[in-house]
Image (cartoon, grey):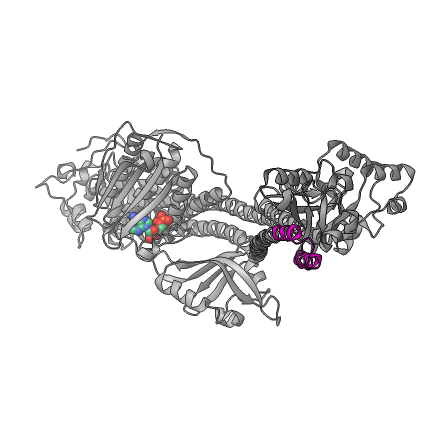
């Protein structure tokens, strides 16, 4: 067959395509020239050379007859191209280059055999024809070795093209010697690419390390059986007082941490692979070399360090130093306890008061008894007086007895005849009135006390005289200028007797007790303390005084004098007076150089008390005439200023003033006011501490959110490049490398999920999660997620059943969050249930009046030990952590799920039996 094949369209060569048809043996010359072993010699012997431009072997020039056997004898791959058509003669070692073109290529013009590289080779042959030898190293040829329509092979070859001269000295052929170097070249390229990617990974790793190094939470990586520090960040170093620990076993490096329980924890985490979460763990550590250990508190996690092959090689300690928050909170708690004990003391004094009231009641009873007795005796006396008028001596003796009795009574006692004239006044009554009895006897009260003519007591006694019924009345007695209790009894002869006692002390105690009870309740109520103080001032007037003002120092720790001061509350029953006081303070501002008044109280922390303010005092204190006039108009009679104190610091002052009521403060009032100042101070302090603690917590959560966000970017780069490599974009990937890349991918995916969970969790903690509540049709929403879940269950050979719900039932929730929680519960069920198990999704109405919808996710999996049923909802808690592959979660899923559910007025609960299965239930309000 001498037809020319179109380049690239050749169809290769079945046996009939070769030029040695069966039975047509080569010439005797050929047999002699190509004598010897090997496939190609045999083919050359059998080949019909006369059909080629070379002609029969007998006519070949000597040069060709010499070179052809030389080429065939070589152990290197060689091909001889002879004549202007470059007819191919090649040896056994060359066969692999031809692929399916062998043996068809024998005796063919090389242009016809290698059209795919002709453009490259043609200029080379031209140069060789001029006598040049061309040497190429690792040259890439794209060869069609597998037949037409098959992909080309990339083949790297090191080769030489050398001229062969004929007898005349002219170039007549080209001898090509080749060595295939493909494997070596590709290996070199791969190596270079690998080095470049490693470099990139190193950059990403360095970025991560930088983030960890500068994180405000601490991080330490411990490796090996001795827990050698391989990485610690600056925050960790600060906690341990700047000591250099990297490269040293933990208990060598930090001997002061021994014996505080960390050894056992570390061992356990390393042994079981279960992470440990410690909250507010106290420990003692030296904060600088040689310094005595001090107590600190940390929140931390020990996490097992798991390599891609599942081996545990160490432990990561990660957490934050929360000493300051803990101390602040403890202080708050201590103060709360203190205020609680104050409250108890108050209750006790209330109880005592009640006891006293009871005693008084008893005494009263006795008095009534003695009054009755008295009445009896009065009666007898009267009778005796009438009957035995002449026996005056005896009468006098009786009278004496009577007097002795009534004088023995500690209350005031008076007797009136039927015309309401005083007939008897005991010593106590004289004492209380400050008037001798003789001045009263034979006169009526209206005559003696004209000012008390319309007194309620006189009216009451007249009622007793008329009705003959005893009566008791409490009230303010103008004649005595104190509150009194008066008991009137009908006496013989149409008269009346009366006992009266000063109850001002009892009144005061009752009022103080009731005021303090009210004040304590006010101060304990949450809300901002400014409102609380305003309510407190309002409650103090007029019970505690005619005026009440509360001043607060916004910066109690500032040393600047005069201090910044804010009047947060002022109360008076008369708004006109308030205005007057306001004018007074603006026109005559506080003189902060004085040691009296509010400045003195703030400076010394001692109360200021002036029981009786005289006009002379006003005059002495006034800055000028106008000032004095205004002070007089305010009519201040008595004043108490007490500091607001908490933790030995002055936070402000309460001013109490008596004015128009003309009352005066007593020592008892002062004690009450001091107590009030202390309680109010603690309330302010608590409110401020609480605010500070809340702010600190919020900034921690914000940091977590920011850090998780920042970690994502480098991770994306790691995942992206690993995927590029796995796709072969950087060159062919060996099986081993593919496995490594798969490990990088699963580890990155795990880390991405972990960071995603932490970010979500931080968003919840900082309240950044928003909820777009809507009506969610339960059955449809569940059907939505099941297709995805059913597939997963199937892959794990589990049976998944969705028991459909009433299509009419809807619940109130954010639809996306609802789906998130359900997917989370279903994914857990699949994760923790072995092959062959089953998972069921169902729902029901529940709660009072069926007001809630419950969605149940039931599995026949591992179950949860009874003592872990609550803990699994805590962040980072995993019960089956060590059994599962490490890439399946971090223990935040349920914490997030429950938080989301509770934000939507629902909950996530669990019932479980170990080895039998679990049912997780999401309840949400029905729409
Ligand atoms: P994670 O699944 O990431 O570990 P979760 O907060 O979702 O975290 O779950 C916490 C732990 O509760 C799990 O580690 C597992 O031990 C346990 N758990 C959750 N769901 C199930 C379940 N359906 N069956 C058994 N154990 C479960």
Question: Is 835 in front, or is 380?
Answer: 380
Q: Looking at this rendering, what residue extends furthest in the left direction?
A: 23
In the shown orientation, is residue 696 left or right of residue 914? right
What stretch of residues is rendered in magenta?
A: 379-408
Residue at horizontal 50 percent and vertical 51 percent from the top: 208
In the shown orientation, is residue 475 left or right of residue 222? right
- Can residue 776 be seen by looking at this rendering? yes
Q: Looking at this rendering, what residue extends furthest in the right direction?
A: 625
Q: Position of residue 385 (x, y in %)?
A: 66, 52
Is-magenta flag for residue 489? no
Is-magenta flag for residue 389? yes
Question: Is 826 in front, or is 479?
Answer: 479
Q: Position of residue 82 (x, y in %)?
A: 29, 42
Question: Is 918 in front, or is 135?
Answer: 918
Q: Main secondary structure of the magenta part?
A: helix
Location of the C terminus by quadrant is top left
Query: Would you place residue 261 above or below residue 432 in this image?
Result: below
Q: Looking at this rendering, what residue extends furthest in the top direction?
A: 808
Residue at horizontal 60 percent and vertical 71 percent from the top: 292
Question: Is 187 in front, or is 123?
Answer: 187
Q: Position of residue 758 (x, y in %)?
A: 45, 47
Location of the N terminus by quadrant is top left
């Amino acid at each position: 067959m001498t037809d020319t094949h179109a380049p690239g369209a050749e169809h290769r060569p079945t046996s009939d395509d070769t030029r040695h048809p069966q039975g047509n043996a080569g010439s005797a010359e050929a047999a002699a020239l190509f004598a010897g072993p090997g496939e190609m010699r045999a083919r050359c012997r059998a080949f019909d050379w006369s059909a080629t431009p070379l002609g029969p072997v007998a006519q070949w020039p000597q040069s060709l007859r010499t070179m052809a056997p030389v080429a065939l004898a070589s152990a290197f791959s060689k091909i001889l191209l002879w004549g202007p058509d470059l007819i191919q003669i090649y040896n056994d070692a060359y066969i692999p280059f031809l692929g399916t073109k062998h043996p068809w290529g024998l005796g063919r013009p090389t242009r016809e055999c290698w059209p795919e590289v002709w453009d490259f080779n043609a200029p080379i042959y031209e140069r060789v024809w001029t006598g040049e030898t061309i040497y190429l190293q690792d040259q890439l040829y794209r060869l069609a070795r597998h037949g037409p329509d098959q992909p080309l092979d990339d083949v790297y070859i090191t080769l030489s093209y050398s001229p062969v001269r004929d007898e005349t000295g002219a170039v007549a052929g080209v001898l090509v010697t080749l060595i295939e170097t493909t494997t070596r070249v590709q290996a070199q390229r791969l190596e270079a690419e690998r080095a470049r990617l490693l470099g990139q990974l190193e950059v990403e790793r360095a970025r991560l390390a930088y983030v960890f190094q500068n994180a405000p939470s601490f991080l330490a990586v411990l490796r090996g059986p001795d827990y050698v520090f391989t990485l610690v960040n600056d925050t960790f170093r600060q906690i341990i007082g700047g000591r250099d620990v990297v490269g040293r076993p933990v208990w060598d490096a930090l001997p002061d941490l021994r014996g505080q329980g960390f050894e056992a924890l570390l061992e356990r985490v390393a042994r079981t692979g279960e992470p440990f979460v410690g909250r507010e763990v106290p420990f003692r550590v030296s904060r600088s070399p040689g310094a005595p250990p001090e107590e600190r508190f940390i929140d931390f996690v020990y996490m097992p360090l798991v390599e891609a092959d599942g081996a545990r090689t160490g432990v990561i300690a990660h957490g934050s130093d929360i000493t300051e928050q803990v101390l602040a909170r403890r202080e708050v708690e201590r103060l709360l306890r203190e205020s609680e004990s104050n409250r108890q003391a108050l209750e006790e004094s209330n109880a005592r008061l009640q006891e006293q009231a009871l005693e008084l009641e008893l005494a009263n009873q006795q008095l009534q008894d003695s009054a009755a007795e008295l009445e009896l005796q009065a009666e007898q006396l009267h009778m005796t007086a009438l009957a035995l008028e002449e026996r005056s001596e005896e009468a006098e003796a009786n009278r004496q007895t009577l007097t002795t009795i009534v004088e023995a009574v500690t209350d005031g006692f008076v007797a009136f005849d039927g015309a309401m004239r005083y007939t008897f006044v005991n010593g106590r009554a004289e004492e209380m009135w400050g008037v001798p009895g003789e001045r009263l006897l034979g006169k009526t009260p209206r005559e003696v006390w004209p000012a008390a003519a319309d007194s309620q007591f006189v009216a009451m006694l007249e009622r007793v005289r008329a009705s003959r019924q005893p009566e008791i009345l409490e009230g303010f007695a103008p004649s005595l200028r104190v509150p009194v209790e008066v008991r009137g009894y009908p006496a013989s002869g149409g008269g009346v007797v009366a006992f009266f006692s000063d109850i001002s002390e009892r009144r005061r105690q009752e009022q103080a007790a009731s005021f303090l009870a009210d004040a304590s309740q006010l101060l304990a109520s949450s809300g901002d303390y400014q409102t609380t103080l305003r309510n407190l001032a309002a409650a103090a007037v007029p019970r505690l005084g005619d005026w009440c003002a509360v001043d607060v120092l916004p910066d109690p720790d500032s040393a600047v004098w005069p201090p910044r001061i804010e009047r947060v509350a002022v109360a008076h029953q008369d708004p006109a007076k308030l205005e007057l006081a306001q004018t007074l303070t603006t026109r005559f501002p506080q003189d902060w150089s004085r040691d009296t008044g509010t400045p003195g109280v703030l400076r010394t922390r001692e109360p200021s008390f002036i029981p009786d303010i005289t006009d002379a005092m006003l005059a002495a204190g006034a800055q000028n005439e106008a000032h004095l006039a205004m002070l007089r108009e305010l009519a201040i009679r008595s004043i108490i200023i007490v500091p607001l104190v908490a933790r030995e610091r002055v936070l402000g002052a309460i001013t109490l003033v008596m004015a128009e009521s003309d009352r005066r403060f007593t020592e008892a009032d002062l004690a009450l006011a001091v107590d009030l100042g202390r309680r109010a101070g603690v309330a302010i302090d608590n409110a401020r501490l609480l605010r500070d603690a809340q702010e600190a917590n919020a900034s921690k959560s914000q940091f977590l959110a920011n850090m998780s966000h920042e970690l994502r970017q480098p991770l994306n780069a790691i995942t992206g490049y690993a995927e590029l490599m796995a796709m072969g974009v950087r060159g062919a990937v060996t099986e081993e490398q593919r496995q490594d890349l798969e490990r990088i991918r699963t580890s990155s995916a795990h880390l991405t999920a972990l960071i995603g969970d932490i970010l979500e969790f931080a968003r919840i903690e900082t309240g950044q999660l928003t909820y777009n509540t809507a009506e969610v049709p339960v059955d449809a929403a569940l059907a939505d997620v099941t297709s995805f879940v059913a597939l997963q269950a199937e892959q794990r050979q589990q049976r998944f059943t969705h028991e459909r719900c009433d299509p009419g039932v809807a619940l109130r929730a954010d639809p996306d969050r609802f789906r998130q929680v359900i997917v989370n519960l279903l994914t857990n069920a699949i994760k923790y249930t072995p092959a062959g198990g089953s998972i069921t999704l169902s729902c029901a109405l529940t709660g009072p009046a069926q007001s809630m919808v419950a969605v149940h996710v039931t599995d026949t999996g591992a179950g949860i030990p009874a003592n872990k049923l609550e803990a699994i909802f805590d962040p980072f808690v995993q019960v089956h952590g060590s059994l599962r592959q490490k890439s399946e979660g971090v223990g935040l899923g349920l914490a997030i799920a429950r938080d989301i559910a509770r934000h939507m007025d629902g909950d996530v609960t669990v019932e479980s039996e170990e080895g039998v299965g679990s049912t997780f239930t999401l309840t949400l309000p029905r729409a």
